[in-house]
Image (cartoon, rainbow, N blue to C red):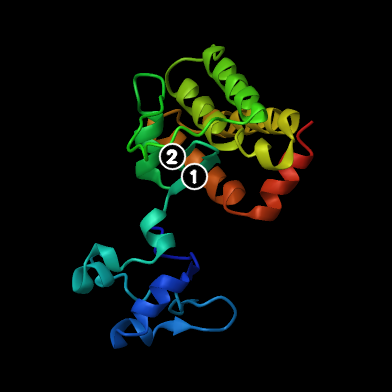
Amino acid sequence: HTCCVGWEVDVDGESLQKFEQLPDIAKHIDYDGTPHIKLSNDERCPFLNDDGLCEMIINHGEEILCQICADHPRFRNFWSNRIELGLGLVCEEAGRIILGRKEPMKLVTLSNDGENTELQEDEKWLMALRDDMLESIDKTGVEARLLEYLIYRHLPDALYDNRVEERIAFVNQSFDEIIGKWKNTDGSFESLVECARVWSYDVEYDDEVLEKKISTAL
């Protein structure tokens, strides 16, 4: 599996300006709709070589990547006083890192801009709720790590849609769905990683499916 096959690679404005100055990249840009890298007939990125490596990085360095390629499989949660950054289960290596942890997940401060911005009251309430949910997890091992991931990733978006109860229900339903599929496999760690990856691809990367699951979770 690779994220360089079957995924539409949209090009952000800043990257587009760089790409247009490089003929080997510019010739693969499609301007129909949002500018994007045109995939080959077998849905491979034209820069994915036979060794599974990115020719853009090989020829121009890692800094040449557009935002979506540089960020994947990361997600962000935005609060008044911080941006939380996490890895998503859609990448199987990220899944191994997340689900293979021995200790509970915790947030680590990477940088501080020195500003003492206060959280708003609704943010304080939601963050406290998240802390309570994390502390109340009665699962262990890989199941605990999966539930932590779902809480970290999906609860903060209640700041924007106020659907706290729906998102809590969605977290629990998603956990049950992934674990249920895993129990129908050989039960290995790699099978869990794959079940989580497929679920993430089908749900977290399809806005219509995600919206439907959240809105009908209760």
* Number of residues whose C-alpha sits closer than 10 Å to that of mark 2, classed few (under 14), some (14–19) or many (20 or more): some
| Left or right, residue 74 beside residue 214 | left
Give the residue drawn at x 67%, y 47%. Answer: 210
Residue 146 at x, y = what percent?
A: 49, 28
Residue drawn at (45%, 28%), measured in percent from left and top? 187
Secondary structure under the numbered disc 2 in the rendered image: strand
Figure label count: 2
Q: Is residue 159 left or right of residue 64?
A: right
Q: Are marks 1 and 2 in contact (CB under 8 Å)?
A: yes
Which secondary structure, mark 1?
Answer: strand
* Residue at mark 1: 76
Quadrant location of residue 154? top right
Between the C-alphas of marks 1 and 2, the distance is 6 Å
Residue 173 pos. (x, y %): 67, 30
**In the image, residue 59 above or below residue 162:** below
Q: Earlier in the sequence, mark 1 or mark 2?
A: 1
What amino acid is labelled 1 in the image?
Answer: Arg
User: Which quarter of the image is occupied by the C terminus?
Assistant: top right
Residue 86 disc label: 2
